[in-house]
Image (cartoon, coloured by chain):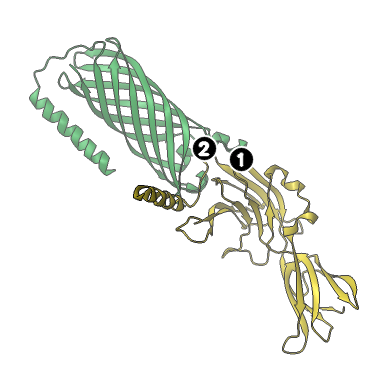
Chain colours: A green, B yellow
Amino acid sequence: MNLRLKILALLLIFGVFNSSAQERDSIYTPHYAGRLQIDLGIHHNFALGENFLGDAYRLKLGGEYGMDVFVSPNWLVGIRFDHIGSNVEKPEKLGNLESTRIRTIALNGGYVYEVLPQIDISLLAAIGRASYKHESFFHTKFHDSALVLWFQPKVGYRITNNLGIFAAGRLRKDFMNIDTSPELEDYFEQSTILTLSFGVRVTTN
Amino acid sequence: MKKIFFLVAAYLFVYSCTPVSIVDNKRLQVTGTIVNSEGQALDGFDVETRTYVGTGFFLGSPDLKKINGTTTNADGKFSFTSLDVDSDELIVQINPNSDSLQDNFQSLTFLDNRSGREETLLDLGTIVLKRRVNITVVFNIEEPFGVQLLYPNPYPVITINNWNELEELPEELEYSRFRDMYTLVEADDDGLYRLRLETLENSEIILTYGVDGITTESTILISGEEESPYEFTP
């Protein structure tokens, strides 16, 4: 596992249990317009389908962080940053690459339903832009860009009023901006990523 | 002043450490079929895209490096994905002159030095690779003799301006397909006047020379099978 991700995971676990002990008797205030929510998480990724990502890569752990603001008790909007690492398994099918990292910035929004005072379920959708940052065997950096859409059901559990954890699944579609021959278009046109994530959530009072 | 010097030095360093500029958001497909002079498919022949690497200030003289490649299948067909290079020469080599060279066949190089090429499909069509032959011509002369030679080059470099018009290349006008040279034929240690050439099977060597002030042109037909020297009397 990437060292930064290990540190992030340790901080998340430490933070959750430390706060849990201190604020066990907090009151869970319902969500309201203007409330801020910050998510920090790590995720495991699976490339799906017979496209370049599913065929020639093995995706590694990734990380996400983002901030949302409630526009009403049940609706929120926000921004997400996402990073996915990868191992290039078949470089020759990609034109010969050494490494690729996928970085994404997206606008996020969705509906939140509080099942219990400390548990909520959200259905989120996002639109954004991804940059597949490659390094060639000449050590030259270049990139492919993509329009990103994703759908993400998420479950949040508040340990205290301000601190909680979340788990989510995410189905993501990347519409690649790669110019290639008609025969290779299907292969390079789009990619699909299934993501399972968990992390820590901080909300304002 | 120091700041300007530092900035210029930093720019030169960064520039020199970027050996190849690869085009974002683009993949080339290189495809085609290789056959021999008899039209039979050639299996196991290498096809590669290459470019010159190391043209930066600190990186010394450029070196021709492979971008990607493949080998032909039993039907002589090949197809592979390649990165594209910008402001650099994109080279496609058939049977590249390297360790893997199928040494009795010629090597063919397509050179595209255009910046910002738009093609994504480099379809080379059907390529006929000829066998290379080393021949010796023995001149029946008694003193050194100057002669102009024109014969097929076993390692031609063909400059490409449009990959979609590859099949319309006028072969007879493609200068790089031929070697055109003047040479002085001198006696070997045994007193015989010989000329050794590497060319292609089923071709011809055109010799142009002057005798008594008259320019004469003669042709030697090369079958490619015979190993005995060709004899020539001006």
Residue located beneath label 2 in the image: B25
Q: Does residue B201 appear in the picture of this structure?
A: no
Q: Residue B141 occupies which quadrant of the picture?
A: bottom right
Whether residue A49 sits left or right of residue A159 in the image: it is right
Whether residue B49 sits left or right of residue B213 in the image: it is left
A4 vs B216: above or below: above
Q: Does residue B33 appear in the picture of this structure?
A: yes
Labels 1 and 2: the sequence-earlier one: 2
Whether residue A36 sits left or right of residue A129 in the image: it is left
Q: Secondary structure at mark 1?
A: loop
Q: Residue at x 29, y 43 (%)?
A: A2
Front position in the image: A79 or B19 = B19
Q: Report the amino acid beneath label 2.
A: Asn
Which residue is at the far front? B1
Q: Which mark is residue B145?
A: none
B102 vs B11: above or below: below
Instruction: Please say if the residues under marks 1 and 2 sit with CB atoms less than 8 Å apart.
Output: no
Q: Quadrant of the N terminus of chain A?
A: top left
User: Numbered disc 2: what chain?
Assistant: B
Q: CA distance from mark 1 to mark 2?
A: 11 Å
Q: Residues within 10 Å of mark 2 (few under 14, many from 20)?
A: some
Residue located beneath label 1 in the image: B120
Front position in the image: A149 or B153 = B153
- Residue A120 position, x and y percent, is 25, 16
